[in-house]
Image: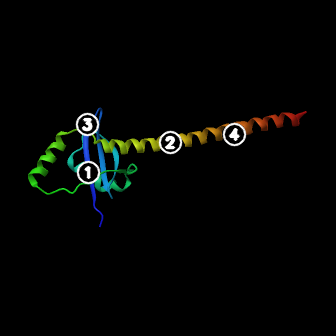
Amino acid sequence: MDKVSGKLTVFFEEPFWVGVFERVLDGKLSACKVTFGVEPKDYEIYDFVLKNYYQLRFSPAVAIDVKEVGRNPKRVQRKVRKQVQNTGIGTKSQQALKLQHEQLKTERKTVSREQREAQKQRQFELKQQKRKEKHRGR
């Protein structure tokens, strides 16, 4: 059975509150960035996760090393305290988000290029049609 883990980090990134969902599946990390706007309350975050988790667009997976963690409660508590104090996103998450951003950018470029070429073709056909209409009149 595969092990799946998830983590949500909420932090303030001028001027909005941002949440980064990190999902580790089969030793690969994928991330998704969500902008909340005003500071979200705990129950608002919980409600958001319940309603919108399956609509989130996660980045492509990046390979990471998954370590087996012992369950020392004091160590876990220190780790949680450290994560709460630490603001920002992990470097692996940043890489995953950057990869997603690059993919979306290339998709946007191809779509806009196709639209631009289609517009040029329409203009050309319109111009040809006008030229033909002018020659019919004589």
Residue 132 shown left or right of residue 42 in the figure: right
Q: Nearer the viewer, mark 3 or mark 1?
A: 1
| Viewer-closest of 48 and 8 | 8
Q: Which amino acid type is shown beneath numbered disc 4?
A: Gln
| Viewer-closest of 52 and 97 | 97
Q: Describe the element under mark 4 as helix, strand or loop.
A: helix
Give residue 126's position: percent from left, percent from top.
74, 37
Q: Nearer the viewer, mark 4 or mark 2?
A: 2
Give the mark nearer the N terminus: 4 vs 1.
Answer: 1
Marks 3 and 1 sit apart, C-alpha to C-alpha, by 17 Å
The disc label shown at residue 12, or none = 3
* Residue under numbered circle 4: 121
Give residue 36's position: percent from left, percent from top.
30, 42
* Residue under numbered circle 2: 106
Mark 4 crowdedness (10 Å alpha carbons): few <14, some 14-19, many ≥20: few
Give residue 93's position: percent from left, percent from top.
32, 44
Q: Describe the element under mark 2 as helix, strand or loop.
A: helix
